[in-house]
Protein backbone atom coordinates (compact mmCIF):
# COMPACT_ATOMS: atom_id res chain seq x y z
CA UNK A 1 0.00 0.00 0.00
CA UNK A 2 1.64 3.23 -1.07
CA UNK A 3 -0.84 5.83 0.15
CA UNK A 4 -4.63 5.77 0.08
CA UNK A 5 -6.15 9.26 -0.32
CA UNK A 6 -9.45 10.13 1.36
CA UNK A 7 -11.24 13.47 1.32
CA UNK A 8 -8.95 15.36 3.71
CA UNK A 9 -6.60 12.63 4.91
CA UNK A 10 -4.48 9.79 3.61
CA UNK A 11 -3.11 6.46 4.77
CA UNK A 12 0.44 5.21 4.33
CA UNK A 13 2.61 2.46 5.77
CA UNK A 14 4.28 3.32 9.08
CA UNK A 15 8.07 3.62 8.82
CA UNK A 16 10.88 4.46 11.22
CA UNK A 17 10.66 8.05 9.95
CA UNK A 18 7.13 8.30 11.46
CA UNK A 19 8.07 7.13 14.93
CA UNK A 20 8.86 10.49 16.56
CA UNK A 21 5.36 11.70 15.70
CA UNK A 22 3.74 8.35 16.52
CA UNK A 23 5.33 8.30 19.98
CA UNK A 24 4.30 11.93 20.56
CA UNK A 25 0.64 11.13 19.73
CA UNK A 26 0.80 7.91 21.78
CA UNK A 27 2.03 9.79 24.86
CA UNK A 28 -0.69 12.42 24.50
CA UNK A 29 -3.47 9.88 24.01
CA UNK A 30 -2.69 7.25 26.64
CA UNK A 31 -1.84 7.23 30.32
CA UNK A 32 0.22 4.07 29.76
CA UNK A 33 1.65 4.51 26.24
CA UNK A 34 3.68 2.14 24.13
CA UNK A 35 7.37 2.98 24.04
CA UNK A 36 9.32 3.83 20.92
CA UNK A 37 10.91 0.41 21.31
CA UNK A 38 7.48 -1.26 21.09
CA UNK A 39 6.88 0.42 17.72
CA UNK A 40 10.42 -0.30 16.48
CA UNK A 41 10.06 -3.98 17.41
CA UNK A 42 6.70 -4.18 15.64
CA UNK A 43 8.11 -2.75 12.40
CA UNK A 44 11.27 -4.88 12.65
CA UNK A 45 9.14 -8.01 13.07
CA UNK A 46 7.17 -7.29 9.92
CA UNK A 47 3.89 -6.26 11.53
CA UNK A 48 1.62 -3.95 9.57
CA UNK A 49 1.95 -0.36 10.73
CA UNK A 50 -0.36 2.22 9.23
CA UNK A 51 -0.36 6.01 9.60
CA UNK A 52 -3.23 8.34 8.87
CA UNK A 53 -2.34 11.95 8.12
CA UNK A 54 -4.30 15.06 7.35
CA UNK A 55 -3.54 16.42 3.87
CA UNK A 56 -1.39 19.03 5.63
CA UNK A 57 0.86 16.17 6.78
CA UNK A 58 -0.20 16.21 10.45
CA UNK A 59 -0.40 12.74 11.97
CA UNK A 60 -4.03 12.02 12.94
CA UNK A 61 -3.69 8.41 14.02
CA UNK A 62 -2.13 5.02 13.42
CA UNK A 63 -2.57 1.33 13.99
CA UNK A 64 -0.37 -1.74 14.31
CA UNK A 65 -1.53 -5.16 13.14
CA UNK A 66 0.13 -8.52 13.78
CA UNK A 67 -0.75 -11.62 11.75
CA UNK A 68 -1.07 -14.66 14.01
CA UNK A 69 -1.70 -18.07 12.42
CA UNK A 70 -5.10 -17.57 10.73
CA UNK A 71 -6.20 -14.18 12.07
CA UNK A 72 -4.96 -10.64 12.52
CA UNK A 73 -4.39 -9.10 15.95
CA UNK A 74 -4.99 -5.35 16.26
CA UNK A 75 -2.27 -4.43 18.74
CA UNK A 76 -2.72 -0.67 18.79
CA UNK A 77 -5.16 1.79 17.26
CA UNK A 78 -4.77 5.40 18.31
CA UNK A 79 -6.30 8.67 17.20
CA UNK A 80 -4.72 11.95 18.30
CA UNK A 81 -6.96 13.47 21.01
CA UNK A 82 -7.67 16.59 18.93
CA UNK A 83 -8.80 14.44 15.97
CA UNK A 84 -11.12 12.09 17.88
CA UNK A 85 -14.77 12.02 16.89
CA UNK A 86 -14.14 12.88 13.24
CA UNK A 87 -14.28 9.40 11.72
CA UNK A 88 -10.55 8.69 11.71
CA UNK A 89 -10.90 5.68 14.03
CA UNK A 90 -13.54 4.16 11.81
CA UNK A 91 -11.42 4.77 8.70
CA UNK A 92 -8.39 3.08 10.30
CA UNK A 93 -10.54 0.18 11.43
CA UNK A 94 -11.88 -0.26 7.90
CA UNK A 95 -8.34 -0.34 6.55
CA UNK A 96 -7.32 -2.88 9.20
CA UNK A 97 -10.19 -5.10 8.03
CA UNK A 98 -9.22 -4.58 4.39
CA UNK A 99 -5.62 -5.62 5.13
CA UNK A 100 -6.85 -8.63 7.10
CA UNK A 101 -9.03 -9.72 4.18
CA UNK A 102 -6.21 -9.11 1.71
CA UNK A 103 -3.98 -11.40 3.80
CA UNK A 104 -6.76 -14.04 3.61
CA UNK A 105 -7.10 -14.24 7.38
CA UNK A 106 -10.33 -15.30 9.08
CA UNK A 107 -10.85 -12.33 11.36
CA UNK A 108 -9.51 -9.52 13.49
CA UNK A 109 -8.88 -9.84 17.23
CA UNK A 110 -8.26 -7.04 19.75
CA UNK A 111 -8.14 -6.20 23.44
CA UNK A 112 -9.67 -3.05 24.87
CA UNK A 113 -9.91 -1.60 28.37
CA UNK A 114 -13.42 -1.81 29.88
CA UNK A 115 -12.93 1.86 30.84
CA UNK A 116 -12.50 2.83 27.16
CA UNK A 117 -16.20 3.02 26.38
CA UNK A 118 -15.67 5.18 23.30
CA UNK A 119 -13.51 2.49 21.67
CA UNK A 120 -15.84 -0.31 22.74
CA UNK A 121 -18.76 1.53 21.14
CA UNK A 122 -16.79 1.95 17.88
CA UNK A 123 -15.86 -1.73 17.80
CA UNK A 124 -19.41 -2.89 18.55
CA UNK A 125 -20.87 -0.57 15.89
CA UNK A 126 -18.41 -2.04 13.45
CA UNK A 127 -19.50 -5.61 14.20
CA UNK A 128 -16.96 -6.84 16.74
CA UNK A 129 -18.30 -9.17 19.43
CA UNK A 130 -16.93 -9.80 22.89
CA UNK A 131 -15.39 -13.27 23.13
CA UNK A 132 -13.63 -13.12 26.48
CA UNK A 133 -11.78 -11.22 29.14
CA UNK A 134 -8.12 -11.18 30.13
CA UNK A 135 -7.79 -10.58 33.87
CA UNK A 136 -5.34 -7.93 35.07
CA UNK A 137 -4.10 -7.29 31.52
CA UNK A 138 -3.42 -3.53 31.58
CA UNK A 139 -1.60 -1.34 34.10
CA UNK A 140 -3.94 1.04 35.92
CA UNK A 141 -3.48 4.10 38.07
CA UNK A 142 -6.03 3.67 40.87
CA UNK A 143 -5.87 -0.09 41.04
CA UNK A 144 -3.02 -2.43 40.34
CA UNK A 145 -4.32 -3.72 36.98
CA UNK A 146 -7.31 -3.43 34.64
CA UNK A 147 -8.88 -6.32 32.74
CA UNK A 148 -9.04 -6.42 28.95
CA UNK A 149 -12.17 -7.19 26.98
CA UNK A 150 -11.27 -9.46 24.05
CA UNK A 151 -13.25 -8.72 20.90
CA UNK A 152 -13.30 -10.37 17.50
CA UNK A 153 -14.55 -9.46 14.05
CA UNK A 154 -15.15 -12.55 11.95
CA UNK A 155 -15.49 -12.53 8.18
CA UNK A 156 -17.61 -15.65 8.37
CA UNK A 157 -20.26 -13.47 9.99
CA UNK A 158 -19.64 -10.26 8.10
CA UNK A 159 -21.62 -7.62 9.79
CA UNK A 160 -21.54 -3.89 9.87
CA UNK A 161 -18.02 -3.24 8.54
CA UNK A 162 -19.51 -1.09 5.84
CA UNK A 163 -21.04 1.36 8.31
CA UNK A 164 -20.81 5.07 7.70
Image (cartoon, rainbow, N blue to C red):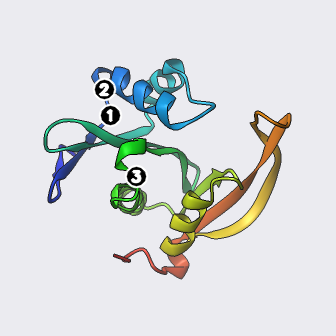
* Residues packed near mark 3 inside 10 Å, few (<14), some (14 to 19) or many (20 plus): some
- Inter-mark Cα distance, 3 to 1: 20 Å
Mark 3 vs mark 1: give the one in front: 3
Disc 3 and disc 1 in contact, CB within 8 angstroms: no
Name the secondary structure under disc 2. Answer: helix
Q: Position of residue 120 (x, y in %)?
A: 60, 62
Query: Who's the residue at 77% across and 41% down the image?
Result: 137
Q: Residue sitting at 49 percent across and 81 percent down?
A: 159
Residue 161 falls in image quadrant: bottom left
Q: Which residue is mark 2?
A: 18
Could you say which quadrant of the image residue 8 lies in?
bottom left
As rendered, which of 87 and 49 lies closer to the eye? Answer: 87
Q: Is residue 126 left or right of residue 92?
A: right
Say if 43 sits above or below 145 in the image: above
Q: Which residue is mark 3?
A: 84
Label drawn at residue 29: none
Question: Which residue is at 50% across, 28% downward?
Answer: 27
Number of numbered labels in the structure image: 3
Mark 2 residue crowding within 10 angstroms, few (<14) / some (14–19) / many (20+): few
Q: Nearer the viewer, mark 1 or mark 2?
A: 2
Is disc 1 placed on a helix, strand or loop? loop
Vertical position of residue 152 compared to residue 69: above or below: below
Looking at the image, can residue 70 be seen? yes
Residue depicted at x 77% and y 62%:
132
Q: Determine which residue is flagged by label 1.
A: 14
- Asked whether 12 or 106 is in front, the reply is 12
**Residue 127 in sight in this render:** no
Amino acid sequence: MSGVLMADRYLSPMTDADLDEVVFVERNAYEFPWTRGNFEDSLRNGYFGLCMRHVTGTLIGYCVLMPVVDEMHLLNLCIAPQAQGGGAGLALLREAVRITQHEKLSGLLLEVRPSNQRAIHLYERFGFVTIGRRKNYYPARHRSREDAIVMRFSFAKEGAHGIA
